[in-house]
Image (cartoon, helix red, strand yellow):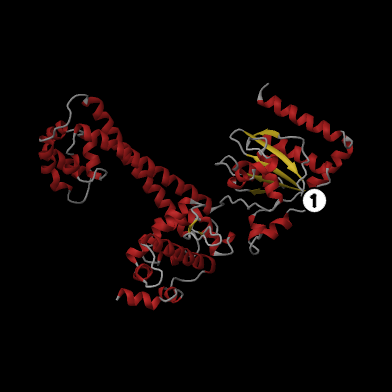
Amino acid sequence: MNGKSKTAKNQANTKNKIENIVSKEELDKKIESVMKKLKSSTWRELETNGKFTKNDKLTFISDEMLIIGCDIGCETHYIRAVDARGRELSRGAFAFSNNSEGFESAKQWALELAAANGKKQIVLGLEPTGHYWFCLAAWMVSNGISVVQVNPYAVKQTKEIEDNSQRKDDRKDPKLIANLVKDGNYGMPYLPQGVYADLRRLSMFRDQLTEDRVRDINRLHRELKIYFPEYQEAFGKLDGAFTLEVLKKAPFPEDILALGEDGLKEIWRAAKLKGASYSKAGRIIRYAGESVGLTDGTEAGKRAVRWFAEKIMEISRQMKEVEDTLHEKCMEMPCAENILEMPGIGEKILSGILAEMGDIDRFDDVREIQKLSGMGLVACSSGKHKVETKISHRGRKKLRCWLFQAAKSAVAHSAEFKTLHMYYTTRADNPLKKMQSLIVIACKILRVFYAILKHGTEYDPEKMMKEIKHPAAGKDAVA
């Protein structure tokens, strides 16, 4: 029996069980009544009117709400339903496909359960798995069903509470998810919209292109190490424009010797390059003449070097296009120019942080963003047992990376942040290690970003230094 026939049989059995409770006419009327009252709530309705606390989450899950847990899969999703007290209303898991037909069948299944059990609203809780949940969440919200998400780690930790078993599968997980939602252990999903969606996509493309470029450069290194071991002394920077232009036309020492100095200089002139590469021609010819690289199998090696050189150049052009678009999108953001006034913060760092952080309106406090980045402080102490406080490392890894890069750049280029770094690492009371100090400065930069984006303020280094405890001591330490 294939997957489609199993889904159809599953849905038919569910209909028969529901129809045993109420008549077909009554059920249709109740379903129509539920459909008219369905209203989805998103983070904009729930999180922008103040902090969405645990009590608010419990209040949102009312007695009139059908709670559905969904285990996300690549092609097939599984759902189960409970009420506000955790009593299961579905008879086992319902499977549906990741397409419009499957979404419609899941909605109909939920409406029939809601109508048969006197529920007026529906909320779908899911465990965010990769990108497979994006379309389902957007479709459900557009059809009046609220969508929330639970932490996959929480699902894993609670799997034994259900049946005292370590078993974890697609049919058990939906009930675990539904019970987590029922207890208020959920968050509102966020899918970027408008300029934020463009920023995140472009940032993702930039990261992918960077990975591809590094991979191809490493492969190019390998080929040249075999056939032209002296290439680093001859060319210097392997991914430089002049080096790649030469490798496209003369990949190995014998080809370089055939070109001669005049041929190398002609390549430099034809590419309209600037810099000192014109004067390197003699040195390149000398190292090519003294090369001890292999001379067998060069035909295939030459093709590989040319291909890698062309690919690296093409990726570089693509990266420039992506970064130019990213910078244009950044300038569409309000107060972006105020952030760029901070020394050490350029358009690349700004675009990376904005892409990972998303809409600033969904945060009521900067500590929420700090927690999202994995820079929230955690400690595990009990009685006399004390451990060192550290950051959680849970959250958006790339946001944490961009904030750390911002801290390093600010310390290198900004006098005020350099003073703070010196103070934190040299103060008499509890001096920090350099890495710890950079983390503290990254959190401070995040607070500055938040104030500028949220309230439209301008960057004021004097005001920032006044808000730091004992800034004078830091200046004395520097002196």
> Which residue was labeled with disc 1?
64
Q: Amino acid at mark 1?
A: Glu
Residue at x 37% of width, y 62% of height? 433
Mark 1: which secondary structure?
loop
Percent coordinates x, y for residue 95 in the rendering: 69, 33
Residue at x 80% of width, y 39% of height? 112
Residue at x 44% of width, y 52% of height? 326
Image quadrant where one finds the N terminus: top right
Residue at x 69% of width, y 56% of height? 57
Q: Residue furthest top?
A: 1
Near-viewer residue (185 or 130): 185
Q: Is residue 465 above or below residue 388?
A: below
Q: Is residue 399 above or below residue 30?
A: below
Residue 328 located left or right of residue 366: left
Residue 197 located left or right of residue 294: right
Quarter of the figure with residue 342: bottom left
